[in-house]
Each structure stands twice: as C-alpha cells, then as structure tokens.
C-alpha cells in the first residue's frame, strides 16, 4: 500500500461511515468533486501541501502513519495566565467535546480529583474552584478573599455548556478513597489562610456532600447513563476518554488544568482497552450491594465532617 492509499484509508476510518470520502476530501482541500475523485481513485497524487492539510485537519500524525509508529499528534488546551485565558480554556473545552453531543457517546474518567464537570456550573463550590484555579495558576503574592471574587458571566456560560455536554453522554467514572481529598483540603487551606469565611467554608463542604449524595442516588437507582466504579489500588490520573461509533478523543493532563488531546486511532483504541481492563478490576457501585456502596460514601462523608469539626473548633479555642 503506497502512502496515498494509506492516508485515504486512515481518513476513511476517521470519518462517519455514511460520509462520502470524495466529499470529505473536496471540502477539506477546497477542490471540486472531480478533482477529489481523481485523488481518491489514485489517478492524481496529493501534493505535499495537500497531504499536510489533510493530516492537520484530521489530527493524523505523519510520523506515526508513514514512519515512526511511536509518534502521536497532540493538541493542547490554553495555558491559563489570566481570567481571559480561563474563559478561552472553557470555550475551547466546549468545542473539543461539542461533536460528541447527541451522538450516544461514552466518557471514561479516571478521577484523581472530583471530576471537573461536578465542580463547574452555578454552585458556590464551582465559584470556589474557579477562584482556586486562578489563584494557584497565576501565583499572585496577594490573594483577594473569596468573598470579593466575582464570576465573569462569559466564564459562567461556558462552564454551563461544558456541564450540559457531560450530562448528555454515558459516564463511566473510576474513583478511590482519595478522589475528594484535594477539594476538601483546598477549602480548609483557604479558610485557615483567612481567605474564606467560616460560613462559606462550611457551605462549600455541604456542596461536596450534595455532590456525593447525588452520585449515590444515581448509583442506587443503577442509572443507565451513569456508572461509578471503586478501585482501592489503582493510581488515578484524571485521564479522560470520550468516544462514539465514529470518533474518539483522549485527554491527558499535564498541569492543573492543562490537557494534551489526541484523536489518534491507535492511541485511543489502546486507551479504551486500558479503561475496559480497569473497569473489570474495579467494583461497580451501581451493581454492588447496599453495604459496599454505603461504606464508600460514608467514608467520604466522614472525611468532610472531620474538616467541618476542625473549622468549628477553630473558633472555640480560648486565646
């Protein structure tokens, strides 16, 4: 198989089965149907520029396809250095996932932390997480108290759009006993630093408890679009794989919010196999008995109550 045949085969595997390869090539290269037909039938050759254009459009690694199979093309999310960057980050995140909306897609999430989709939207916790991300990423010497932090409306809108996409797909999440640790420790850290009031700190913990209760309810009802798995041994990493019958994307974190993104078929297929293996080795909290499910969620609630007690005791100390 020559390189042009290999490129055409790769593109044919990527595009939906009901899409004409000739039409797809014509659209990307902005050429006529007849010119595209000649290339697809191998009567004409792609120019170097056309090959690069097709590889860029379909996120195909030229090294991986024509040479070194270990090289993969990745996109990456916007580096966050300002509130405008954060807005663009969520806007781009919506665009990365938008094509999966209303397509019977499945999302797999290795939840090192409470998944992003729970901590965005209109809750006090979502505002707090944005506050934390901005302050930690910007590295300011002087941090404004949480109560003076105002949410940008555009930012709020994009987080809602991202949340709606998450709610539209079938979810498979793997959690362990440390998944909630980062969020509950962040609340206590900013409280101790005098940047979050006692009242808001407790309300933030209540938001996490509400998230846990919502998830437990879905598990106990064995919701067909939500599946939670518990793995006490696996080291989770916040990797995300989303796929449907035609396309798939893998998101690999490299900073607090930064992700590398690839649609490489070989890589995403391997990721899907890896996730399938991990699910087999994890306990489904949808299908397990009430005792196992209650033990998992009770342990999480006990952690939160411990921090709430520490906050309440903080003001009972006699100085």
Image (tube, grey):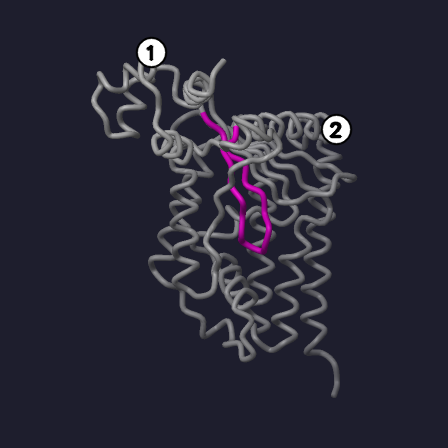
Specify the quadrant of the image occupied by residue 55: top left
Residue 250 inside the magenta-drawn segment: yes
Specify the quadrant of the image occupied by residue 110: top right
Marks 2 and 1 sit apart, C-alpha to C-alpha, by 47 Å
Which secondary structure, mark 2?
Answer: loop
Read off the residue under disc 2.
Answer: 281
The residue shown at (27%, 24%) is 26
The residue shown at (32%, 12%) is 43
Residue 221 visible from this viewpoint = no
Residue 310 inside the magenta-drawn segment: no
**Vertical arrangement, residue 30 with respect to residue 192, above or below:** above
Pick the front one: 24 or 30: 30
The residue segment tinted magenta is 247-264
Location of residue 33 in the rendering, given as x and y in whole percent from the top left corner:
22, 18
Location of residue 249 in the rendering, given as x and y in whole percent from the top left corner:
50, 34
**Vertical arrangement, residue 302 with respect to residue 55, above or below:** below
Location of residue 78 in the rendering, given as x and y in whole percent from the top left corner:
45, 54
Pick the front one: 107 or 79: 79
Location of residue 44 in the rendering, given as x and y in whole percent from the top left corner:
31, 17
Residue 300 visible from this viewpoint = yes
The residue shown at (42%, 51%) is 90
Mark 2–mark 1 CB contact (< 8 Å): no
Task: Identify the mark nearer the N-term, 2 or 1.
Answer: 1
Specify the quadrant of the image occupied by residue 246: top left
The residue carrying pointer 1 sits among few (fewer than 14), some (14 to 19) or many (20 or more) residues within 10 Å by Cα, namely: few
**75 lies left or right of 267:** left
Pick the front one: 183 or 140: 140
**121 lies left or right of 308:** left
The residue shown at (44%, 23%) is 14
**135 lies left or right of 46:** right
Read off the residue under disc 1.
Answer: 41
């Amino acid at each position: 198989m020559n390189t042009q045949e290999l490129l055409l085969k790769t593109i044919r595997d990527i595009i939906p089965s009901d899409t004409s390869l000739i039409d797809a090539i014509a659209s990307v290269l902005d050429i006529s149907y007849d010119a595209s037909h000649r290339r697809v039938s191998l009567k004409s050759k792609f120019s170097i520029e056309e090959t690069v254009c097709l590889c860029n459009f379909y996120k195909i690694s030229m090294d991986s396809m024509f040479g070194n199979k270990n090289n993969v093309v990745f996109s990456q999310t916007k580096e966050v250095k300002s509130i405008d960057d954060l807005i663009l980050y969520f806007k781009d995140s919506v665009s990365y996932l938008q094509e999966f909306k209303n397509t019977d897609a499945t999302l797999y999430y290795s939840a090192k932390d409470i998944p992003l989709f729970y901590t965005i939207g209109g809750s006090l916790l979502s505002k707090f997480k944005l506050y934390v991300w901005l302050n930690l990423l910007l590295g300011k010497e002087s941090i404004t108290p949480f109560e003076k932090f105002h949410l940008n409306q555009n930012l709020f809108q994009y987080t809602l759009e991202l949340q709606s996409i998450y709610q539209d797909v079938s979810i498979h999440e793997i959690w362990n006993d440390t998944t909630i640790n980062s969020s509950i420790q962040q609340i206590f850290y900013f409280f101790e630093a005098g940047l979050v009031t006692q009242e808001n700190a407790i309300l933030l913990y209540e938001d996490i408890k509400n998230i846990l209760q919502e998830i437990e309810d879905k598990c106990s009802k064995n919701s067909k679009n939500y599946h939670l798995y518990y793995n006490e041994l696996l080291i989770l990493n916040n990797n995300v794989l989303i796929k449907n019958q035609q396309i798939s994307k893998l998101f690999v974190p490299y900073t607090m919010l930064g992700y590398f993104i690839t649609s490489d078929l070989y890589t995403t297929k391997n990721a899907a196999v890896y996730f399938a293996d991990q699910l087999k080795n994890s306990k489904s909290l949808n299908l397990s008995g009430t005792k196992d499910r209650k033990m998992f969620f009770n342990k999480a609630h006990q952690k939160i109550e411990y921090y709430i007690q520490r906050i309440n005791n903080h003001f009972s100390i006699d100085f």
